[in-house]
Image (cartoon, rainbow, N blue to C red):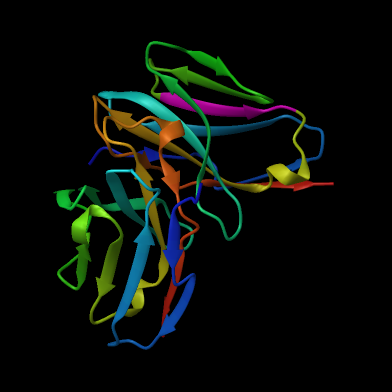
Amino acid sequence: GENVGLHLPTLSVQEGDNSIINCAYSNSASDYFIWYKQESGKGPQFIIDIRSNMDKRQGQRVTVLLNKTVKHLSLQIAATQPGDSAVYFCAEISGGSYIPTFGRGTSLIVHP
Amino acid sequence: EAGVTQFPSHSVIEKGQTVTLRCDPISGHDNLYWYRRVMGKEIKFLLHFVKESKQDESGMPNNRFLAERTGGTYSTLKVQPAELEDSGVYFCASSPLGPSSGNTIYFGEGSWLTVV
C-alpha cells in the first residue's frame, strides 16, 4: 500500500550545525504535509506544515521543502541545539481527510 | 486550558490479561484519534471518532482491541486478552471538527504498554 517513509533512521550532528531530515512519500494524492517532533516521554508536537501548492515554507529556525516531482519532503533545522534532540516524523493528509498518516521517524541526536 | 490527557502513563501486564487505556480530549474537540507506535517503527493509525461515532477503524489490528467513546467525551481503548506484540506506546489525539490541519491536532503524552 502507499506509505510515508524516511531515508535515515538516525542523524547525529554537532551543536550549531544545520540538520536535514528527509522523508519520501508515495501517495500522489497527498496534498498536505506536517512535521512533528517527539521528545522522550512526550507525544508528537506540531513543528511546521506545508500544502502541495507550495515548495517551501519557513518557520523559526525550521524550513520545510517539498518536491512533488520526486515525492520528497525535507525538514531543515538551522543552528541545531541540544534541545532539538528528538524523533522527527513526517505525516501526510490527503484530500480533505481528517487523518494524518505517519512515517517511521528519524532520531536526531545533537552533540554539545 | 488542559491538553489531551491519557491514563495510565505506563502499564506492565502479563500476556492474557486485560488493559484499558483512557483518553480525555481537549474540551470541545469532536475528532478523537488513537494511534500506536511499536518500538522503532512508525506511528500507526488505529481509529478515528467524530463525537461518539466511529468514523474509521481500519487500523484496528484485530478483535482483541475495542474502542469506545461514550457520550462523545472521553474514550477508552481496551485490549483483551493482551499479547506480547501489543506492547508499544498508544497515543491519543484530538482536533476540532472539520478537515485536519497540523496545528489543530493535539497529541497526548501516550500510554506506554508493556506486555510480558
As rendered, which of B62 and B51 lies closer to the eye?
B51
Residue visible at 35% across and 67% down in the picture:
B22
* Residue under the point 45% across and 59% down: B5
The answer to whether residue A26 of the structure is visible from this angle is no
Vertical side of A64 occupied by B7: above or below: below
User: How many numbered marks are there?
Assistant: 0
For this view, does A111 lie left or right of residue B105?
right
Residue B52: x %, y % from top left: 18, 53
Q: Is residue A107 above or below residue B96?
A: below
Q: Could you tell me which quadrant the C terminus of chain B lies in?
A: bottom left
Residue drawn 42% across and 67% down? B88
Where residue A76 sits: x, y (%)?
Answer: 62, 27
Q: What is the magenta range? A: A72-78
Q: Residue lying farthest right?
A: A112
Does any portion of residue B25 appear in the rendered image? yes
Image location (x, y in percent) of residue A69: 38, 15
Residue B66 forms part of the magenta stretch: no
Residue A26 quadrant: top left
Residue B68: horizontal and vertical position, in percent? 20, 63
Task: Determine the residue positioned at 37% across, 38% down.
Answer: A4
In reply to whether residue A76 is colored magenta, the answer given is yes
Q: Is residue A24 left or right of residue B1?
A: left
Residue A77 lies, with reference to residue B111, above or below; the image says above
Compared with A90, B110 (above or below) is below
| Majority secondary structure of magenta residues | strand
